[in-house]
Image (cartoon, helix red, strand yellow):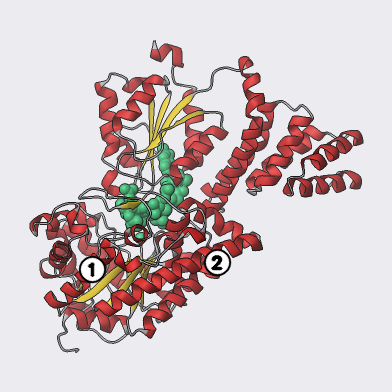
Amino acid sequence: MVAEMTSKERVLAMLNRKQVDRIPAITGSTMVKEYIEKSGGSWPDYHSNAEMMVNTAGLMHTDAGLDNVVVPFGMFIESHALGLDVKMGRIDIQPSVRSFFSKPEEVKYDNFLEDKYVKTTLDAIKLAKEKFPDAAITAFLVAPVTLAGDLMGAENLSMLSIKCLQKEKQMQKMKEWISVALEINKIYARACIEAGADALYYSDASASPNLVMPEFYYEIGVPAEKELGDFVHSLGCPWELHICGDTTPIVEGMSATGANCLSVEQAVNMSEVTKIAGEVPVVGNLTPLLMVEGTEEQITGAVRKALDGGAKGSMLGCGTPPLSTSDRLKTWVKAVADWSAEKL
Amino acid sequence: MEDLPEEVQGLIEELDEAAEDEDLDKIEDLTQKLLKTGVDLEAITLKKLSFLVMEGEEEMAQGWTRVAIQVGLDPFKTLIEGLAEGMNLIGKKYEQGEAFVPQLLIASSAMYSGMDLLEPYLKREKGHTSKPVTVVIGTVEGDVHDIGKSLVKTLLSANGFNCVDLGNDVPASKFIEAAKENRATAISMSTLMTTTMAEMPRVIKMLKEEGIRDKVMVMVGGAPVTTEYASQVGADVSPHDAASAATWLKSSVNDFPPECERWN
Ligand code: B12
Ligand SMILES: [Zn+2]
């Protein structure tokens, strides 16, 4: 038996492959409408007001009982700071990037840390550390392939992912985009860690086999993520890697990046991927929509299935939907605790 | 192609290279030489075009479209049995899990690059074919994901449909307006987000309110959209990907009253 842990200890133990008192339940994005309203947040201010952001994200920990507190709320911060157009979405839709660059040389990032949303993220990390010292304060960041996709446009990323495997000239182009993305990633990562983040959660949504060639992921994606991950580790911080869609063909590559845990979607079979990942903890795979319309039975069933399949943390497949309800989030956390009490 | 005389095979290879380098004079010259050999250049060109589109070879597909134009091949035949055939072939492979999205996208660029060259010839001869069936297509309001939508459009175009593309983040009323204006036969809506799925029944409700629901077929699709959801919201169908959307629509238009009957 392991003595009772705080949420933060539990998450860090899982990431460091140590024993836990119970399986941690963690989240990626946390822009939940019910909690925004409950904490008095208003759209779109909660994206640029650190206090509103932390009050909302904090309810995921204090009310729902999740083990981490995650900021910011969307994957648009990096792009906004680089001067791309961002559409702010709605209270129930995350902001999205609406423009892209035509050449890597156009990307200027000297004043990256001066951006208002970047500043909000850093302030929110500091504030969350103060307010919730027992939770794992996690920064939600865009990983290199996806950032390169935001820089050049997702459709161009997809096409270049096959062309670069065929022609050396295209490969050079791809490498230039990726190296700019990595420079930006490192600036932001360092700032988040200096602000006190306990872990970095990287989404590489666009590295998915649903969008790019798996061979491209192995040849370019894995080394890029590893370079960033090694940098994060050199600053003493663990990191989590999420990739969307059916990642079964690339889990082996994901395991080779050095990520402290891999987060996968509902499109994969948990027991199959935990076998491929071996020692590397895998989390995720719960259908996000369960938090919007799932019954207690469905939620409990899905949680148990993932944990029986070898998941080391309980997590939704692809971010927490904005229309999630607090009672369902609690049902999820309870199911994790019950399973742990029985089987750990 | 392997059973062609060696001389012809050599010329075809040279033509491939000239096309890759976009050397127009050389393409013209080699086409003449090929014609002189007396081979069935029409059959070779169509086969080449479908293969090159399938492989996503944009420059070469363009080069061989020039060959087709130079030898006076029927532009519609060039499009349907050459360029579009290649798009359909890769679409089928994707449907069977044997190809990935990037392959569809580069095939799509290759097809369109050839189509651009054919465009002026297609127009000139338009008089002699029946009016193509029109599909109004877009991604619903609030959602900016449009790669999948564009692939549906590509496959529909490859199968001879005329697509009116409204882009992404399209308000419900725009679908209705465009359907009326173009006397559409079908509306195709995409969404990739669960939060914007509810836009689909909104569009269908508006169609009913405007009294034109029975004038169009409604297809809905995108990763979170299931067949059950489609029938629940009153859509006609949700084929599971872009290739099957084209197949379904092609067979369904036969049983659907023609445009003049519906819209008059
Ligand atoms: C690329 C991408 C983007 C790009 C989109 C670029 C563009 N121009 O389209 C960018 C970076 C802009 C983006 C933004 C966002 N995204 Co995004 N994105 C993706 C990603 C990685 C791939 C989607 C894709 O293009 N797939 C390839 C195409 C070909 O597939 P497809 O669209 O499904 O189409 C196929 C079929 O569905 C079908 N089909 C499509 N339409 C139709 C229509 C009919 C009638 C039929 C029959 C068939 C059909 O045919 C196609 C081919 O066969 C997915 C994750 C993933 N791996 O799937 C997330 C994903 C879709 N995004 C998501 C989210 C949440 C967002 C954002 C809100 C924020 C974010 N996390 O980045 C914003 C969106 C804001 C907004 N208001 O829309 C979520 C959606 C979650 C959900 N289910 O609700 C996903 C699943 C991942 C995630 N959590 O980040 N995204
Ligand atoms: Zn995802």
User: Given the image, on which type of amino acid does mark 1 rest?
Assistant: Val
In this picture, is A332 found above or below B206?
below
In this picture, is B113 found above or below A126?
above
Q: Position of residue B98 (x, y in %)?
A: 56, 53
Q: In the image, what residue occupies the spot 77% across and 26% down?
A: B72
Left or right of A24, for residue A131: left
Left or right of B256, for residue A321: left
Placement of the C terminus of chain B among the 4 image quadrants:
top left
Question: Is residue B49 or residue B58 the one in the foreground?
Answer: B58
Task: Say whether mark 2 is within 8 Å of ligand 1.
Answer: no
Rate crowding at label 2 as few (under 14), some (14 to 19) or many (20 or more) other CA atoms within 10 Å: some
Q: Which mark is residue B72?
A: none
Q: Earlier in the sequence, mark 1 or mark 2?
A: 1
User: Given the image, on which type of amino acid does mark 2 rest?
Assistant: Lys
Q: Which mark is residue A175?
A: 2
Question: Is residue A205 or residue A112 the one in the foreground?
Answer: A112
Q: Which residue has dot 1 on it?
A: A70
